[in-house]
Amino acid sequence: MQPARRIYRRESEENRRSALIAATQALVAEGGPEAATVRAIAERAGVTPGLIRHYFHSKDELTRAAYRALMDGMMAKGADAIEGVGANPEERLAAFVAASLRPPVLDAGAVVLWAGYMHKVRSDPDLMNVHEAGYMAFRNTLQRLIETLPRETKPGQTRTEAIACNAVLDGLWIEGSLLPAAFAPGEIITTGLSSIGAILGVNLLAHISKLPDFRKTTP
């Protein structure tokens, strides 16, 4: 009986931390980081303000955890997509790109939440570190996928390509999330695949029919 009780406590703590992170994210999305006060977070999560200190040393630590959860969640979708395809390097890259440009990653709420942190990143070194870690994790994954493509490359080429491809994905993610009606069904994904394919000199669109959960549509 004793081991069962310990497992229950661990699960409860994880759920409570997740609830506090979710409450923080919701408040930041609604009114920016300033809206995520300890009192507001506690009220949104349905706990007392003092309980927050049990899980996080400070509000800033909770804020950083909420931002890290956002970045890690988006990154996880791309990693999951790679696991769902075969060993073909182009197909794996296409799956990662497509997962980065469709729901739940493609989401207005996620963009608004991300934007809510941006002005604070420059004044908070610890939050900047979280931002940099998330950016580098995504870009490094892209670079590793690019390096597996059967091509001849020059020293430093794949790094530059990963930077460029990341920038393309960032732009499409923002506009596709905030202005979904401006694009035909599937257009954001096909545009991402064709643009990144053009940068790398490969035909990623050739693998679109193999991508998980992609419904090919005609604008």
Image (cartoon, rainbow, N blue to C red):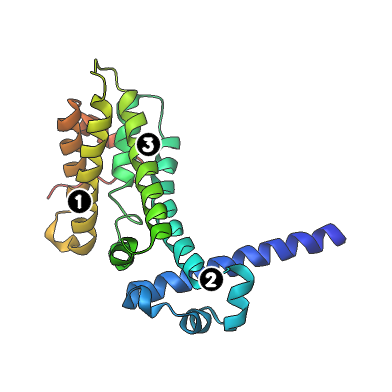
Residue 47 visible, this orientation: no
Residue in view at x 24 percent, y 15 percent: 152
Decide: few, some or many residues near mark 2? Use Cα within 10 Å; few <14, some 14-19, many ≥20.
few
Give coordinates of residue 122: x percent, y percent: 31, 61
Residue in view at x 40 percent, y 25 percent: 87
Residue that label 1 marks: 172
Residue 139 visible, this orientation: yes
**Is 38 positioned to the left or the right of 99 in the image?**
right
Give SS at disc 1: helix
Residue that label 3 marks: 141
Give SS at disc 3: helix
Number of numbered discs overlaid on the protein picture: 3
Give SS at disc 2: loop
Of the pair 184 and 111, the residue shown nearer to us: 111
Residue in view at x 33 percent, y 55 percent: 103
Q: Amino acid at mark 1?
A: Leu
Disc 1 vs disc 2: which is toward the camera?
2
Q: Earlier in the sequence, mark 1 or mark 2?
A: 2
Residue that label 2 marks: 58
Residue in view at x 19 percent, y 51 percent: 171
**Separation (CA) of disc 3 from disc 1:** 18 Å
Q: Which quarter of the figure is the N terminus placed in?
A: bottom right
**Separation (CA) of disc 3 from disc 2:** 32 Å
Give coordinates of residue 112: x percent, y percent: 29, 67
Give coordinates of residue 23: x percent, y percent: 47, 74
Q: Are marks 1 and 2 in contact (CB under 8 Å)?
A: no
